[in-house]
Amino acid sequence: MVKPDGGTLAIRNNSYRKYHPRFAISQGMGYCPEDRKEAGIIPELSVRENIILALQAKRGVFRYLNKRKRNESAEKYVKLLNIKTPDVDRSIKSLSGGNQQKCIIARWLAANPELLILDEPTRWIDIGAKIEIQKQILDLKNKGLSILFISSELEEVIRVSNRVVVLRDRQKVGELSGKDINEQSIMHTIADY
């Protein structure tokens, strides 16, 4: 939604300069924003409506999901991500922060993304929900989903990453992989710049 300064986006060996959300969804990308209350959930809608939002956007306005499919999809991801809600008709704003965050992740999983961008997915949630979300991220990664994980918490970066890119002032200052993904190496990369 913010126009980049430059560069291209490569998806399946094709380069693009389009960056609007509808294009990203059509290319199999999902995005969980840093601020779930301001940019993630739609508080007036139910858990079900929040979960199926990206799937409906991917299908298009004229290919409306029927009620049975909306319910099936929402129930599937409520169960998969262990979202604590009495039912999918419950208003999303009545859920805890961790469960709201899981609903946003469910939204993108329902749209079957190839790349899921998670921007601070565990910020401002309790430790139990944080551990549960990290477990789900690891499960998704192990199933082959590409995840771009953005976090200021070093411990969780180390826990969930195969490769770590260190940025400063929107510039890449280092890249680590394998055994080099540890606190000392990351701090050294940050300090050396």
Image: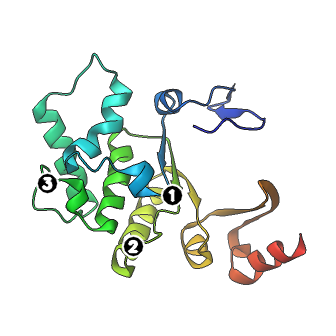
Which quadrant of the view contains residue 59? top left
Give the residue at mark 1.
Answer: 34
Whole-Å distance between the Cαs marked 2 and 1?
Answer: 12 Å
Outermost residue, right side: 192
Residue at the image point whose x is 67% and y is 35% from the top: 3
Q: Residues within 10 Å of mark 1 (few under 14, many from 20)?
A: some
Q: Position of residue 89 (x, y in %)?
A: 12, 49
Which quadrant of the view contains residue 71? top left
Outermost residue, top side: 62
Q: Residues within 10 Å of mark 2 (few under 14, many from 20)?
A: some
Of mark 3 and mark 2, the one earlier in the sequence is 3
Q: Which mark is residue 90?
A: 3
Q: Name the kind of residue labelled 2 in the image.
A: Ile
Q: Position of residue 115 (x, y in %)?
A: 52, 44
Give the residue at mark 2.
Answer: 125
User: Mark 2 and 1 residues: CB-CB less than 8 Å, in contact?
Assistant: no
Tell me the SS state at disc 2: loop
Tell me the SS state at disc 3: loop
Whole-Å distance between the Cαs marked 3 and 1?
Answer: 23 Å
Q: Name the kind of residue labelled 3 in the image.
A: Arg
Asked if 114 appears above or below 57 in the picture, the reply is: below
